[in-house]
Image (tube, grey):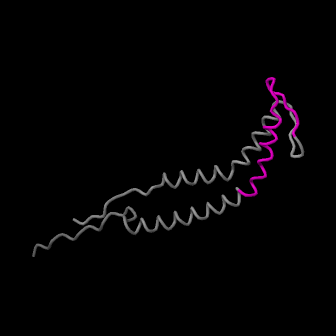
């Protein structure tokens, strides 16, 4: 009657952490995409050299678009950091999963006991 307790592996926690790593690593790329999309939609010029006026709805968003565009340079830090964090995440996942399988089994039912002999 000493059956091992059945527990589920915490995949959701690992998925949330992976999503966070990806979101932080790719955020600068997202800012550049948003900047380019807004600038193209409104016919504005955006470059890294200086701020250009961009009138949208009567307001000048040139500084905001410039900032969003220049944030793309942050990818020089976030992409390698994201790769490093992903490797650490993967190592922890593999080690945790292997330890979990040893402790709680791999979902394999226990062997069927032999029936008692009648003789």
Q: Residue at x 43, y 68 (%)?
A: 99
Seen from the viewer's position, the closer of residues 91 and 47 is 47
Q: How many marks?
A: 0
Q: Residue at x 29, y 68 (%)?
A: 111
Left or right: residue 73 versus residue 81 is right
Q: Please provide percent x and percent y for residue 96.
A: 47, 65
Quadrant into which the N terminus falls: bottom left
Seen from the viewer's position, the closer of residues 52 and 7 is 52
Quadrant into which the C terminus falls: bottom left
Q: Residue at x 69, y 48 (%)?
A: 27
Left or right: residue 44 versus residue 23 is right
Seen from the viewer's position, the closer of residues 119 and 10 is 10
- Residue sitting at the far top: 58
Q: Residue at x 66, y 58 (%)?
A: 82
- Residue sitting at the far left: 119
> Which residues fall within the magenta stretch?
51-77
Q: Quadrant of residue 61?
A: top right
Q: Please provide percent x and percent y for residue 117.
A: 14, 73
- Residue sitting at the far bottom: 119
Residue 109 sits above or below residue 40 on the image: below
Q: Please provide percent x and percent y for residue 101.
A: 41, 66
Residue 79 sits above or below residue 51 on the image: below
> In the rendered structure, does residue 3 fall within the stretch colored magenta?
no
> In the rendered structure, does residue 59 fall within the stretch colored magenta?
yes
């Amino acid at each position: 009657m000493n059956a091992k307790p059945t527990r589920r592996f915490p995949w959701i926690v690992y998925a949330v952490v992976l999503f966070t790593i990806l979101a932080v690593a790719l955020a600068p790329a997202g800012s550049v995409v948003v900047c380019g999309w807004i600038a193209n939609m409104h016919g504005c010029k955006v470059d890294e050299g200086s701020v250009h006026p961009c009138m949208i709805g009567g307001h000048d968003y040139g500084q905001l678009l410039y900032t969003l565009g220049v944030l793309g340079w942050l990818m020089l830090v976030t992409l390698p950091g994201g790769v490093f964090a992903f490797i650490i995440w993967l190592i922890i996942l593999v080690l945790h999963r292997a330890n979990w399988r040893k402790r709680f089994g791999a979902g394999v039912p226990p062997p069927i006991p032999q029936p008692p002999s009648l003789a």
